[in-house]
Amino acid sequence: MKTISIKVNGQTHQLDVDPKTPLLFVLSDELGLRGPKFGCGLAQCGSCTVIYRGRALRSCVFPVEAVGEGEITTLEGLGTPEKPHLLQQAFIEEGAAQCGFCLSGVILTAKAALDEKPQASEAEIREALGGVLCRCFAHTRMLRAILKYAGQRKS
Amino acid sequence: MTLSRRKFLEMSGVLVVAFGSGSSLTSLAVGQGAFDTHASHIDPDKLDSWIAIGSDGKITAYTGKCDFGQGMYTAQVQLIAEELCASLEQVDLIQCDTAITPDQGTTSGSQSTPTNFNMESLALAAATARETLITMASKHVGEPVDAFTMNEGIITSRSGRKIKFAELIGGRRFDVAVSPAAKRRSPKEWRILGKPIPSLDRSALMTGRFPFVQNVRVEGMLHGRVVRPPEINAVLSDVDQGSVRQSPGYVKTVINKNFVGVVAEKQWQAIEAARLLKVTWKSGLELPSGDRFYEWLRSQSSETEVVLDSNDIDRHLSGSVQNLNATYVYPYQMHASLGTSCAVADVKKDRATIWSATQSVYPTRSCLSKILGLPLESVRVIYTRGSGCYGLNGADAVSFDAALMSQAVGRPVRVQLSRQDEMAWENYGAACVIDQQAAIKNGDITAWSCEAWQASRGGRPGYDHPGNVITGMLLGYVANEVKPNPIPKRVKEFRNGDNSVPSYFAGFVNGKCEGAGSLASERVVVHRVRSPFFTGPLRSPIRLQNTFAHESFMDEIATSLKVDPVALRLRYLRDPHMIEVLKLATERAAWKTRSSARRDAMNGEAAAYGRGVACVAYEGDNGFAALVAEVRVFRTEGRVVPMRFTIAIDSGPVSNPDGLRNQTEGGILQGLSRALCERVTWDGRKITSTDWESYQSLYLDMETPEINVVIVNRADGPATGAGETAITLVAAAVGNAIYDATGIRLREVPFTPDRIKAAVKKSTAENQLV
């Protein structure tokens, strides 16, 4: 056990944890966050995605001790039901989910990709989502929502 | 604030749903006393079992059919609001909690809509509630019952008196029976049902607030991790508990027959302890070879059923001008939920509460009562949504895991499976072999025979078979096993729940033709064979496998007759719903009549275009659909690119068109993943497809087709299921499109690039020989 300080969704937390603990378990068990989820523990599916230093990060294989000063943003940190982020709003309008378990992976990966390259083409957005799984296969609606947001960002 | 926001934000801890909101209503429902239907104390014949109206006018409805992402929550709220002429905001819906909801068995088999949206159960209760309120209003103000209208929870009399629901009944029981004569509001009157209401869970989901079963946290909760056998038939030999005693946070090793689990304070500690625990297993029987599995399957002794037999098949096959034969094979596939299965159990000495994503709270409660040795009424199972399941995933097994470990440590325990444990031990969709034979004479089909072999072991645990899933088996419960019968059983009534009968058959049994077609010389024989792995319902169970074989073979017959595949289908279809959807889909897809195959590839094009069709009467009568798939096939890479999919679907009066579209679009893409890449693999002793590299699923960068969903929305028929209809057609329609494009007939799913390239090579060699 070791006291570790991490900044998540704008708040700093001091936690006594095994420093090797994957960040995901700290977020979901210690901080009670519901956005990032355990899907595979192998960085193969994207369910545990958070944004870290502007990039999409698979928190299931990232030890909490490696976080350091960088801030973590989870799906709930992006926006609230009262004030959703524009990308979340696009997903709400398009009804772009079924069970919704994959949404951290889909929404945050798309956000990070578009933050990095706002002019990304549809093909580039798809490519960025190449490692993200949705087993309900709500793909069509999700891509529509992401493209809608990308269009709004540009204008 | 919208309903969805309010509802899901209030659910800080799923516990609130069960114990908190409207406590007077909850206690009212709990205090209903003992009844003995399916061992449930909640009598489905009483209106109070389904609907309660609080002193604040809120309507609380109790349902035994749950939402796992298919939209059943929203649709049921619409139903209640519609029948009670209320707004969506006035309705709270409690789903599947053995303490307070009626026993509606399992949410599965596309049965939720037929059960709760026609003339029984929830719909009938809601209609009864409306009529009862009107009768009460009539007594209240002394005006005749036909003098009232209802709107937004207010009843208005002809003379202008306004009465709120709460004034009439608020906080009290109705004390009336659900009336079989209660009149449903007709689809023509619908204001809320039948409309594309945005799903109510949306904003909670998109902003990461939705409480999944994975998010349930109970005070004093520990974390458990199972240690499954390393091989399919291995048994436990020894556990060295000393190997983990010093592990941080370690609480206990739980051993029961072949079940092993470790409990620790934190999740990561439980994972580490389970990894470090030294367990010795003894290998059991070897598995049948994966390479020759289909031959193995058809050579086993089986439980055989003759579903149909006109007794003239052999005569036709011997006398016809031309016989066609083909064998289709379908692999084991997984539910492979994105999130691994999870449950939280709080087992005390004399009672237990389990938060579970099971589709079957009452059957699961019954199995848990056996496993825990507690009386049925002392066990409560509360449905809490998990990752999309698509059928029997690991939800039931992990509920047993959590309960066992909680009982062993006397504290609440949360268990979430590892990816590998989820994939190695779930109940797979069955592998099948299907032989087809047809006799052709003078340009017509004169006889058709199907013989299927289906791998089967275990399945849904139901009320008393915990051994049908892995945890139960490890505890020594026996799985439902196939019992080979030397003399085939003849089915006495027409049955097509598994779509074992092609749509073109007359289905003549017991003096009646109940099939969807007109072909009178017909035979269907089904062999169930003992599977080496657990099997269970996976979205469109067996129906997809059968439909792949039937609809592919119908195309092969069309090719052989040099007839357009749609024209040939229409020649043999009798059912008007089937004819309608087939015509609708092909019209919308601008289907050009010609005999297959177009074989662009033969003209040297790199990417060959092809179109294929398939249609089905799902489960014989539970929804109808036809799909036209248009694809391009890149021959050298063996790659199939879906271009445009056009589907016409008839599921009776539609509760929520947006929900139906979402299910249909998702069904088509999931169907593509299953048609193009998914299959379970194994070696001599164990499953080898245990993660997303070894079990392939199409990712978000898959090439998606344009999808056109044409909804028939028949107002006058019964409401049918719709969640499994689209997926049933995909493998067949895509296989037929690949044939149309290339002249290559693929009879084995999945249509992987390797298989396509091999078939191209073989076909090229054959052409050169000619």
Image (cartoon, coloured by chain):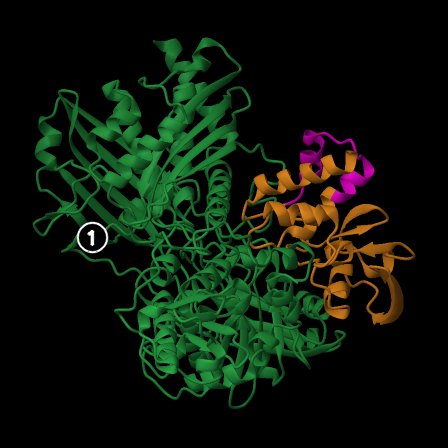
Chain colours: A orange, B green
Residue B284 against residue B512 in the figure, above or below: below
Residue closer to the observer: B734 or B91: B91
Residue B480, located in which quarter of the rendered image? bottom left
The local secondary structure at tag 1 comes to strand
The quarter of the rendered structure image containing the C terminus of chain A is top right
Tell me residue B178's x, y (percent). 32, 75
Tell me residue B85's x, y (percent). 44, 64
Tell me residue B632's x, y (percent). 50, 23
> Outermost residue toward the bottom?
B350
**Amino acid at circle 1:** Glu
The quarter of the rendered structure image containing the N terminus of chain A is bottom right
| B575 to the left or right of B752 | left
Residue B250, located in which quarter of the rendered image? bottom right
The part of the chain drawn in magenta is A111-132
Chain at tag 1: B
**Residue located 45% across and 72% down the image:** B62
Residue B506 against residue B268 in the figure, above or below: above
Residue closer to the observer: B718 or B284: B718
**Residue located 72% across and 29% down the image:** A121
- Residue B305 in the magenta stretch? The answer is no
Tell me residue B47's x, y (percent). 36, 77
- Give the residue pinned by disc 1: B305
**Residue located 8% across and 42% down the image:** B311
Residue B741 visible somewhere in the drawing:
yes
- Residue A127 in the magenta stretch? The answer is yes
Residue closer to the observer: B37 or B582: B582
